[in-house]
Structures are given as structure tokens and as C-alpha cells.
Amino acid sequence: MRVVLDSEDVARGLRRVAGEILERHRGIQGLVVVGVRRGGELVARELVRRLREIEGHDVPMGSIDITMYRDDAATALPNPRIGPSTMPDNLENSSVILVDDVLYTGRTIRAAIDAVLDYGRPRRVELAVLFDRGGRELPIQPNYCVRRLEVAPNERIDVLDRPEGLLAIIQPDSAPTIPPHP
């Protein structure tokens, strides 16, 4: 296991991404931040905190469970655990910033876009990720990214919620998943 972003790196990177979002959208008017359950929720919460620090106002936030939208749900999920999705009341004509922790094949994001569209028709959907690790199977690219990092196929990036903030580690794919901080 090795730390690739400590909590200060994550905070600094998300401040930069928040600034890029605000510059592109000229403020927070019409923005909705949606985190992909689970890791994306953690990153989305921190991104919303950074947007609030800069703008002084809250940005509506939701979270989306993609379990039933996965293209491998029937074969890879014999006993799926479906979690709740919580979305702002109206996505019509909004600019959704879809947030995930790690972008890899693109399949999770494809499923997340399908799930978001079930809640309404936003004007646009943009993607913000903490990590882009390459290895795409679908033509999906992030609009905002804290770090691009090549990761071996037998490794994974885990984002952990710790009292000092989020941190990211790389470890072997076979390693047990480290539980989030209670």
C-alpha cells in the first residue's frame, strides 16, 4: 500500500477543480453536484465544501446508486446490494457535475449517466474525478481531474475518509478493502 494523495493534496486539488468549475460556469447558478455511490459521494461532498468556501453559498448535491444500471449486473451481481439515491427535486436545465473517485474503464460513468437521466433532462452533464487511471473501454473522459496516474491492472486506487480528510492509496487488487472511517 502506498499513499498517492494525502488529505492536503486532495483538498488542494479539489479547490483547483472547484475554481475551474466556477470559471467555466460563471458561478454556481444552475449547478447540481451528484456523487456516484460510494467513493464518488465522498469526493462530491468535499467538492461541494470547496465550492461553498469560494462562493459562500451551498450547491445542491445528490448521490446516485448505479447497481441496476451496470452492464454486468445480471452476471457479476448475483446478490446485488442496492443503496439509496438522493437527488435534488429538479434536474431540468441544470448543469450536473457528476463526481466519482476513480475513472477507469468508463463503464461506471456510463451507468451513472443513465441513472441521472432517469431523474430529468439536465442541460449538460460534466464529469469530475479525483483520479483518471487510464484503461478506458468506453469513450468517456473527465472534464475535471485532480490527478492522472497510470496504475497497473493488478492494482487499485482506494479513497479513504479519515478524520484529517480524504486520502488516496494504491494497493494490490487482491488486498482486502479498507473500511471507511466510522
Image (cartoon, grey):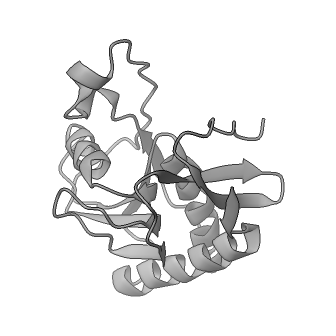
Q: Nearer the viewer, residue 17 or 7?
A: 7
Instruction: Look at the image and tell me in which quarter the N terminus lies.
Output: bottom right
Query: Does 38 sit above or below residue 44?
Result: above
Determine whether 99 is above or below 12 in the image: above
In the picture, the quarter occupied by the C terminus is top right
Residue 55 visible here: no
Residue 54: give x, y in percent of width and height. Answer: 62, 79
Residue 157 position, x and y percent, is 54, 55
Residue reaching furthest to the bottom: 23
16 relative position to 10: left or right:
left
At x 51% / y 52%, what residue is drawn?
A: 156
For residue 112, which quarter of the picture? top left
Q: How many marks?
A: 0
Q: Residue at x 38, y 12 (%)?
A: 79
Q: Residue furthest right?
A: 163
| Residue 6 image position (x, y, % from top left) | 73, 68
Q: Residue at x 42, y 87 (%)?
A: 23
Q: Is residue 77 above or below residue 114?
A: above
Q: Is residue 105 visible?
A: yes
Seen in the image, is 8 located left or right of residue 176? right
Work out which residue is located at the far top of the displayed protein and give it.
79
Q: Relative to the observer, which residue lies in front, 96 or 140?
A: 140
Which residue is painted at 25% across and 34% down in the image? 70
Image coords of residue 126 (percent x, y): 30, 66
